[in-house]
Amino acid sequence: MVLWYFGSLFGAAFFITYYIRNVVQRPLLLNSSGKFRKFLENNVSLTKRKFWPTVWCFESRAQTVISSLVRGQVLPDIQYTREILQLKDGGEVALDWRFPLTATEETPVVVILPGLTGGSQTDYVKGLVLQCHKTRIRAVVFNNRGIGGITLKTPRTYCGSNFEDLSEVLEHVNVRFPAALVGAVGISMGGLILGNYLAGKGEEATKHLSAAMLISVPWDVFKGTESIEKPILNRLLNYHLAGCLCKVLAGVREVVEPAGLGNIDNCLKSSSIREFDSNFTSKQFGYKDVTDYYNHATLHNKLHKICLPTLCLSAGDDPFQPFEAIPVDAANNSDHVAIVVTARGGHIGFMEGLWPFHQNQYMFELFAQFFESMFYRNGYKLLNSYKLEERID
């Protein structure tokens, strides 16, 4: 009995020591030493304090999976005002709006781009929307084609490299609220789409956005794909997400199949994201093969093209994006892109504290601090290379 008692004490002491010394760390802030970094350090306090991963759940896959389950319990379904936006090619996307209680013509807007098959009621999206509500920001969720319960009108769906639909959405938001500052946040594949928009548009993006944020974005799609295909737990996550893609495709099969974009039966048998992209996505968007698609989608070599203040959140143990895939050198040489890298957090996880069953989780707080400082503490005036009056005109 005595040996068991002292053994338990020793084990607990060892675990606590390991947790404090190796798990709890101050996040890296990757950015040049210019005004953007100084602004973040002065206004976004989470960039300076240690990240305390949930003590009973700090392993990367556990953070990834359990965080979604936890948020599903603590975040209520949200009542949106839906707007159907007609696109130039005849397609449609659903824009789900949530307005703060006291909104004016100048109340800022944040466009939210969900991940792979996510939508307005996805757990992390709801968390971001609730933070918008608290910080007096209009939130609008951009549901990709065929997502969110609307009928697919054309054979085209969506992919990580193509930002044509996002361009139309941002133009529409700016026309609808011409006096409001507009920001955007992309999560996972939504971050790929937003990041490619920022890089592809360059200076032109500043005409439609004042700030942007990317959360758990797969910077290097090749390395991310290799990581998620490793056995055993990563591969199980990969299999699950491939199943989600197949489910979406099955729901729009009647619209897509007549376009002759490959054998849909084979596409629906895909057991990995790479296989699905090879069988379907790359063909639908006219790429030679999946390698060509991933070359166009990847972001790690495009940071120098981004001209907009962009804050990014990545975890060093993200199973979808290993630390070595994060563009550390590019970020450290960028005046516009800053990457906050926590040692732990998984993929869209970032659970913190002993009891994470609450709405103010780390990534939601970071999101709120950043956009509140950009919109309400004149961050856009300090950082953007254009004048607000020029954007409104």
Image (spheres, rainbow, N blue to C red):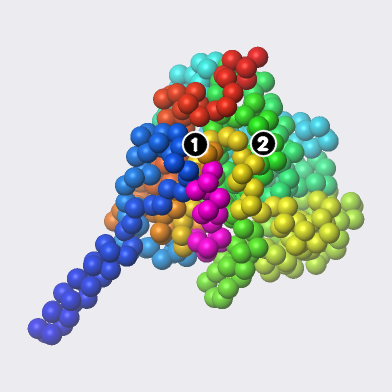
In magenta, the rendered stretch is 318-334
Q: Secondary structure at mark 1?
A: helix
Residue 196 in view: yes
At label 1, the amino acid type is Val
Residue at the image point whose x is 44% and y is 41% from the top: 33
Q: Which residue carries the number 2 mark?
A: 202
Query: Where does residue 14 sit, x and y in percent of width and height?
Result: 23, 73
Q: Tell me the crowding category of disc 1: few under 14, some 14 to 19, or many 20 or more residues within 10 angstroms, Cα based.
A: many
At label 2, the amino acid type is Gly
329 falls in the magenta region: yes
In front: 154, or 326?
A: 326
Residue at the image point whose x is 81% and y is 51% from the top: 285
Residue at the image point whose x is 85% and y is 63% from the top: 263
Is residue 159 rendered to the left or right of residue 78? Answer: right
In front: 55, or 391?
A: 391
Compared to residue 378, the image places residue 79 above or below, namely below
Query: Where does residue 31 sit, x and y in percent of width and height?
Result: 48, 45
Is residue 143 rendered to the left or right of residue 37? Answer: right
Q: Which mark is residue 129?
A: 1
Query: Where does residue 87 sit, x and y in percent of width and height?
Result: 77, 33
Mark 2 or mark 1: whose residue is earlier in sequence: 1
Q: State how far apart marks 2 and 1 are (Cα).
A: 27 Å
Residue 72 in view: no
Query: Where does residue 321 sit, x and y in percent of width and height?
Result: 55, 60
In what quadrant of the picture does the C terminus appear?
top right
Compared to residue 335, the image places residue 392 above or below, namely above
Q: Which mark is residue 119?
A: none
259 falls in the magenta region: no
Q: Tell me the crowding category of disc 2: few under 14, some 14 to 19, or many 20 or more residues within 10 angstroms, Cα based.
A: some
